[in-house]
Each structure stands twice: as structure tokens, then as C-alpha cells.
Amino acid sequence: MSSADYAIETRNLTKTFKGFTAVDDVSLKVERGTIHALIGPNGAGKSTMFNLITKFLEPTTGTILLNGKDITSQKPAQIARKGAVRSFQISSVFPHLTLLENIRVALQRRMHNSYHFWKPESRLDVLNDDARTILTQVGLEDSESVLATELPYGRKRLLELATTLALEPKVMLLDEPMAGMGTGDVQRVADIIRRVAKGRTVLMVEHNLSVVADLSDTITVLQLGAVLAEGSYDEVSQNREVRSAYMGEADD
Ligand SMILES: Nc1ncnc2c1ncn2[C@@H]1O[C@H](COP(=O)(O)OP(=O)(O)OP(=O)(O)O)[C@@H](O)[C@H]1O
Ligand SMILES: [Mg+2]
């Protein structure tokens, strides 16, 4: 497989903070059209990897490629324009707008970015139709007039996912999509992620290992900033080093 087959690729990526190495020579390959999970104990470097890939942090050394193109020296907005969108933890929701308005803002942002904003699609009724389609994709179609601030936590996360979808990402970076969710919501969000991942690439950081097992085509296990193991869930979960890295973290 060539570099162009990977939605995201890092080569020997390293990030040090004042001499402390948080990400240590990581070469990651995320195949296009797959769901790829990044797991590992607390402090393993997962969030730092996400921040490097989305250009919120500058790497100390190494290269980052998006669809085979070197993006190491690009700005976060340029990466977003190329279709790589990060969801969760960085909130993209306006609390005092309704759900429908929130999605419309995101749709307008996308149109603005893609220089199609002058086209007739930007007419209000078309925007509303598109926004409703997206709300339906995440199961929020019954709440379009509700203010975002009034949503319970689980549904607020669904709205964040919806605003991400409105940007039509080719690559979705999901940072702990299940964090803080109850069991019922976890199943629901997992089903939605599986559905919206079709035709896209998803890279996610997630602590809930049953979700990771359920959704992921490939899993990369980080420990102390470095890759400890990589493969399918069956492969990595049988790896002795992975099992010992996770000992004492069973309920994470
Ligand atoms: N800005 C920073 N300055 C100094 N050290 C940092 C900084 N950001 C992260 N680190 C350190 O780098 C290591 C990796 O942190 P990171 O947040 O990437 O881990 P993580 O795998 O996301 O952990 P968690 O599962 O707890 O979210 C940790 O030891 C952390 O303390
Ligand atoms: Mg983290």
C-alpha cells in the first residue's frame, strides 16, 4: 500500500515538552475508509497525537501526511479545509441557538470554506432541509427547536457530532466520544458512529474498550508515547505487553 492509500500517516512523529517526550517516534498509518482507534493508559500520548495531527501542536520532529500530502507545516484551518475535522472536547456548539440553527451555522461555515457559498444551495430553505437531514442522522430530529443548552449531556454530544457531520468531513477525529455517557447513550452513539463512518475515515481515542472492540478495524496501542502494539482487537487484546499495560485499569 502506498502513502496515498492512507488518510492519515505520521512518520517518526515526536513531541517533547521541555525535555519530556510525550510522543516518541510514532509512525501511524490510518487506512482510508476504516475506523482506527488509538488506545493506551493515561498519559500514553493519545491526546498529544490528536493535537499534532490536527495541528494544534507543532511536532518536535517527524512528518504528518493527509491523503499522502505533507501537512506538517500547515495551519489547523488548512487541515479542516482539506476535510479533516476534529469532534468532541473542542466544542463546536452554540448553547443559545436551537439545534437547527446550530447545524445551519455549521453548514454555512462549510459552504464558506468551499467557495460554493454563492451558489443557490445557500438559500434558507435548502439549508433547513440539509440541517434536518443531519439531525435525523444522529437521531435528534424531534428536537430541532430546542436550545442546545437545554439538551441533556448525551444528546449534547450527539449535537457536536452533527455539527461535525455538517462540515462533510472525509476524516473524522473523535476524541473520547463516549466520555461521561451512560450505558444507553454509549450503544446509541456507537451505532451512529458506525453509520456515519461509511465512506469516511475515523480516527478515535476512546477509553471504553468494548466500544473500541465493537467499532474498530484497526487498533494502535500507545504506551509512554510509543507504539506498543497494533492490529485487530483480537490481536492486540491477546498481546502480553498490552495485557500488562492495562492491568489495574480494567474498569477504564
Ligand atoms: N503541554 C504539556 N506540557 C507538558 N507535558 C505535557 C503537555 N501535554 C501533555 N503532556 C504530558 O505528555 C504525556 C502524554 O499526555 P497526553 O495528554 O497526550 O496523554 P493521553 O494518552 O491523552 O492521556 P489520558 O488518557 O489521560 O487522556 C503526559 O505525561 C502528559 O503529562
Ligand atoms: Mg487524553
Image (cartoon, grey):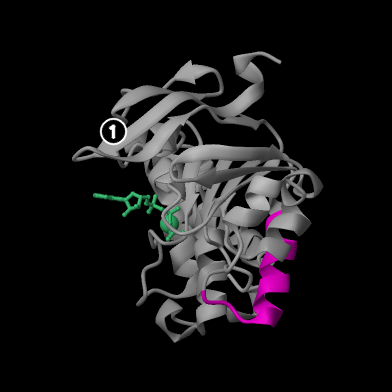
Give the magenta-colored segment's residue range: 180-195
Residue 101 vs 23, above or below: the answer is below
Residue found at x 50% / y 64%: 160
- Quadrant (top left/top right/bottom left/bottom right) for the C terminus: bottom right
Residue 186 vs 45, above or below: the answer is below
Q: How many marks?
A: 1
Q: Position of residue 183 (x, y in %)?
A: 68, 80
- On the image, numbered disc 1 is attached to which residue? 58
Residue found at x 36% / y 69%: 94
Q: Is residue 187 left or right of residue 80?
A: right
Q: Is residue 213 left or right of residue 42?
A: right
Q: Which quadrant of the figure has residue 93?
A: bottom left
Magenta stretch, overall SS: helix
Residue 169 seen in the figure: no
For the residue pair 35 and 13, the one nearer the viewer reads as 13
Q: Is residue 155 left or right of residue 105?
A: right
Q: Position of residue 67 (x, y in %)?
A: 56, 23
Residue 192 vs 48, above or below: the answer is below
Q: Is residue 26 left or right of residue 130?
A: left
Q: Is residue 189 magenta?
A: yes
Q: Position of residue 88 (x, y in %)?
A: 47, 60
Q: Position of residue 205 (x, y in %)?
A: 54, 53
Quarter, ligand 2: bottom left
Identified by mark 1, the residue type is Glu
Q: Which quadrant of the figure has residue 68?
A: top right
